[in-house]
Amino acid sequence: MDVNTAFVNSDLDRDNVFFNLPDGYAVHDDTGIDISSEYVLHGKRALYGLPQAPRLWNNRLTEWLLAQGFVQCNKDKCVFKYSKDGSVILLIVYVDDLAFAGNDDKLIAEFKKQLSDPETGFSMKDLGTLKWFLGMHVEHDRSTGSLKLHQRQYIEDMLKRYARFIEGMAPKSTPANPDITLTKADCPLNADEADEKFEWRTQYRSVVGSLLYAQCGSRPDISVAVSKLSQFLENPGPKHWEAAIHCLLYLKGTSDLGVTYTKQSPEWAHRLSMFVDATWADCHDTRRSTTGFVGMLNGGPVCWRSQKQPIVAQSSCEAEFIAACKSANEVSFLRDTLNEWGYPQPTTRVYEDNMAAKQIAHNPGALRERSKHFEIRWFKLQELVTDNIITMTYVGTKEQIADALTKNLSKALFIRLRDFLMGTAKFDHSRYD
């Protein structure tokens, strides 16, 4: 549902905001002299353009929802839950866009009626079953119990925007060439001369930003490529531009691809799992490693990251341990969120393909000579394991889904892992029971 003129629903009683008289409106004294300059308007309602308007609107909506019996999520203040006699409504808010789901059609209809009544709620526009949200297309298949999120329209619009750079080029099968490494050595020595020589220099940041939005929404498969491209925004060279074009051509051939969520067995329905990996010292400029992890729920990804680590790891074990700790922080957040929503979580499996990192996580004091220099913050992982919040589970490298988030892979391996990453292939957890 969409709120009509959302910001003007908020009062400005606590804020003394004054406006100049609008053009064409005049105030005259008894003698007919224009004295408009001596008057201002005292604002009573928030208006679009006021810095505090979004916050005031959010406060107004939150107060209304809480008054109706909704409970605000502690971990995400834009998520609300309503429960009554076993019926549940989950509501998410993004500025003036509201999306909700529940298990009682009658209760949802009553809520929508109350919400859209100007006397008791707000002036709303009911857009029906959720099909579009923040540029993402939502496809429901009730017969199979699956849901797919994709950004085909956004990607097609993006390709049209940069059509002059990719015209006549064939689609690529991977988001990046695994045989090419991007470094600062590929950056021009003189940025000003490069700006004059290469027309695309003014477009590089725009292209990478467009790719980043697709990656954050529903395309974790381009995470590595986008992460690498983002490291050269200040002074890109021809090699970096060719890599950006390569990623665009990959999207050209896979615009329909998206993340898919499906019904799971009773044991794994609404149960979180995490896959984490690291590539040691792969950055040729800093010798830092790359962290990659993906959280899976109901067969599809709910969080993912491909990111250069903040320090130089002195071994592959240290790189993997740092990555595992980063993923464990995300696990803690997601577990708390799911518990608030009414989906209590058993111990969460974190799939890792490094035995040394797994051993250190489960046995404090193990491999002391290899881990005594680790920063204190990384040992949060051991605490989570000791408290049975997570358990590190070894998985073979060939089945490590997060491997697709740490490095550019060959075509065959990338496509195989991509199917698991996007939720189109089912990972068999029972093999690791």
Image (cartoon, grey):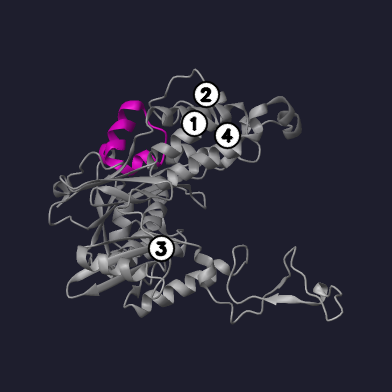
As measured in the structure, the alpha-carbon distance from the residue carrying label 2 to the one carrying label 3 is 42 Å
Around disc 3, counting alpha carbons within 10 Å, would you say few (fewer than 14), some (14 to 19), or many (20 or more)? many
**Badge 1 amino acid:** Leu
Q: Which tag, 1 or 4, sits closer to the chain's start?
A: 1
**Residue corresponding to mark 3:** 124
Query: Mark 2 and 3 residues: CB-CB less than 8 Å, in contact?
Result: no
Q: Secondary structure at mark 3?
A: strand
Assess whether mark 4 and mark 2 are in contact (beta carbons under 8 angstroms): no
Badge 3 or badge 1: first in the primary sequence: 3
Binning the other alpha carbons within 10 Å of mark 1 as few (below 14), some (14 to 19) or many (20 upward) gives many
Please tell me which of labels 1 and 2 falls first in the chain. Answer: 1
Q: Nearer the viewer, mark 2 or mark 4?
A: 2
Which residues are drawn in magenta? 398-421
Would you name the residue on which mark 1 appears?
Answer: 159
Please identify, in this view, whether the residue under mark 3 or under mark 4 is nearer the observer.
3
Where on the picture, by quarter, is residue 54? bottom right
Q: Name the residue type under label 2.
A: Ile
Which residue in the protein does label 4 denote? 183
The residue at which mark 2 appears reads as 166
Q: Is residue 285 visible?
A: no
Q: Amino acid at mark 4?
A: Thr
Q: CA distance from mark 3 to mark 4?
A: 51 Å
Sequence-first disc among 3 and 4: 3
